[in-house]
Image: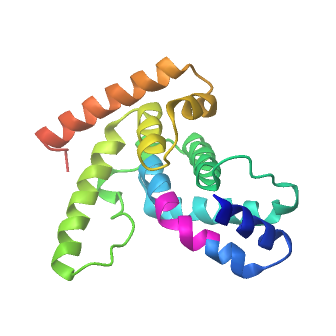
């Protein structure tokens, strides 16, 4: 966290390398969050870039009060929610679901990872938006339930229920196989 404070200070002073460091440090996690929420890699990449453009543009008034990762994850979730409002995810055929963020492993492992990732994204696409968001922000965003509750403007019990029911449905979908 101290490193993040230093990077934010450097960015405020106009150091472009600091923004690059922040981007490189968090891009994979944030892209995963965006992809899980939007079920579309290209849209998630657009959201991620929009978040970083807005972050860099508003850096002068920015105050880092807690985790930079959590802050950026919340920004990605908010932008993703806005995108979902613009276009219902139900308009996206499951055949068009992206492959997810690229892996850097061996070709055979990449193929298996890609298939498993597609299977997971298809299952996530079957969940209600609120459940998918609670699961994604908790597991990939590293956010606590009380933070997610504030973000979603609901009680912590509601978030915990969304998380639990979402995991149960996800487990069921993955065990029975998701429709291709």
Q: Residue 124 versus residue 91: which sits nearer the camera?
A: 124
Quarter-of-image position of residue 109: bottom left
Query: Above or below — where is 31 with respect to 92?
Result: below
At a point 63% along the width and 26% down the height, the residue shown is 153
In the picture, which quadrant includes the N terminus?
bottom right
Q: What range of the chain is rendered magenta?
A: 22-31
Q: Position of residue 64 (x, y in %)?
A: 75, 52
Number of numbered discs present? Answer: 0
Q: Position of residue 34 (x, y in %)?
A: 50, 54
Q: Residue 142 versus residue 168: which sits nearer the camera?
A: 142
The answer to if 170 sits in the magenta stretch is no
* Left or right, 116 with reference to 163: left
Q: Position of residue 135 (x, y in %)?
A: 41, 39
Query: Above or below — where is 50 with respect to 136?
Result: below
Q: Residue 77 versus residue 5: which sits nearer the camera?
A: 5
Quarter-of-image position of residue 174: top left
At a point 35% along the width and 59% down the height, the residue shown is 96
How are the residues colored?
rainbow
> Farthest front residue?
2
Q: Position of residue 90 (x, y in %)?
A: 41, 41
At a point 54% along the width and 45% down the height, the residue shown is 87
Main SS category, magenta section: helix
At a point 58% along the width and 22% down the height, the residue shown is 154
């Amino acid at each position: 966290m101290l490193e993040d404070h230093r990077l934010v200070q450097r960015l405020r002073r106009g150091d472009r390398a600091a923004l690059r460091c922040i981007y490189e440090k968090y891009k994979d996690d944030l892209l995963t969050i965006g992809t899980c929420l939007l079920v579309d890699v290209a849209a998630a990449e657009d959201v991620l870039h929009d978040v970083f453009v807005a972050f860099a543009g508003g850096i002068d008034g920015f105050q880092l009060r807690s985790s930079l990762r959590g802050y950026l994850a919340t920004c990605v979730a908010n932008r993703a929610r806005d995108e979902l409002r613009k276009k219902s995810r139900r308009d996206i055929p499951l055949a068009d679901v992206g492959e997810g963020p690229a892996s850097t492993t061996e070709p055979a492992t990449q193929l298996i990872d890609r298939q498993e990732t597609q299977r997971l994204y298809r299952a996530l696409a079957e969940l209600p938006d609120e459940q998918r968001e609670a699961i994604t922000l908790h597991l990939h965003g590293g956010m606590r339930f009380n933070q997610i509750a504030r973000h979603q403007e609901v009680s912590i019990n509601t978030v915990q229920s969304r998380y639990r029911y979402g995991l149960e449905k996800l487990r069921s979908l993955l065990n029975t196989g998701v429709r291709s």
